[in-house]
Amino acid sequence: MPKSWTEKYNNGKEAVVKTLEKKFSNMITSDQMLIATPKTIDHYIRQIPKGKKVNLKTMRKDVALDFNADNMCPLTTGFFLHIVIEKGHEENEAGTSIDKITPFWRVIDEKSPILKKLSFDAKSYLNLQ
């Protein structure tokens, strides 16, 4: 049986900072790259004030700075953000109030590529504050 999104969220791993040995994405050799966790991303999103939006590039930089890194891995950021979004939807579907789930709509919009990967149509969430 596949793991639930909540089980994937609670993977027990810790965030790690690695020194890049070669150029990767928009980072250069010797940059300190953070490999976060779903919980790290969740925590950041929950700190975004109601009515405000933050793009993924800003989120990656902000979270990395909290760990004394230059940037956060864009690949794992996408994986972990997917987990956070699916977990929030899973909780909402199970009856958790919308104001208690992670407000993922503050970091994605209707042009976000991640929308195509979700198991549900997230457009109804995108207009929330």
Image (cartoon, rainbow, N blue to C red):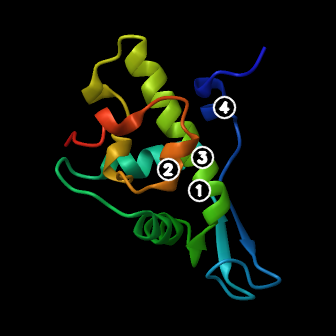
Q: Position of residue 123 (x, y in %)?
A: 34, 38
Callout 4: helix, strand or loop? helix
Q: Are marks 3 and 4 in contact (CB under 8 Å)?
A: no
- In the figure, residue 127 lies in which quadrant? top left
Mark before the other along the chain sequence, 4 or 2: 4
**2 or 1: tag closer to the N-terminus:** 2
Asked whether 120 or 59 is in front, the reply is 120
Q: Which residue is mark 2?
A: 41
Estimate the x, y position of residue 98 in percent, counting from the top left.
28, 25
| Quadrant of image for the N terminus | top right
Determine whether the residue tagged by mark 3 lies in a helix, strand or loop: helix
**The residue under label 2 is which amino acid type?**
Ile
What residue appears at the point 64 percent right and 83 percent down from the top-left corner?
27
**Residue at image mark 3:** 80
Give the class, few, some or many, for how many residues have Cα within 10 Å of label 1's Cα (few <14, many ≥20): many
Q: Which mark is residue 105?
A: none
Residue neighbourhood size for the residue with mark 2, other residues' Cα within 10 Å, grouped as few (<14), some (14–19), many (≥20): many
Q: Residues within 10 Å of mark 4 (few under 14, many from 20)?
A: some
Q: Which callout, 3 or 4, points at the residue further toward the start of the chain?
A: 4
Count up the numbered dots. 4
| Label 2 secondary element | helix
Q: Nearer the viewer, mark 2 or mark 1?
A: 1
Picture layout, residue 1 above or below residue 70: above
Q: Choose the circle earlier in sequence order: 4 or 1.
A: 4
Q: At 41% across and 52% down in the image, what residue appears? A: 44
Name the image quarter holding residue 19: bottom right
Question: Distance from label 3 to label 2 (Cα)?
Answer: 7 Å
Report if the CB atoms under discs 2 and 1 are less than 8 Å apart: yes
State the separation of the CA atoms marked 3 and 4. Answer: 9 Å
Q: Give the label on residue 77, or none.
A: 1
Residue at horizontal 64%, vertical 21%? 4
Residue in the picture at 63% in, 31% down: 10
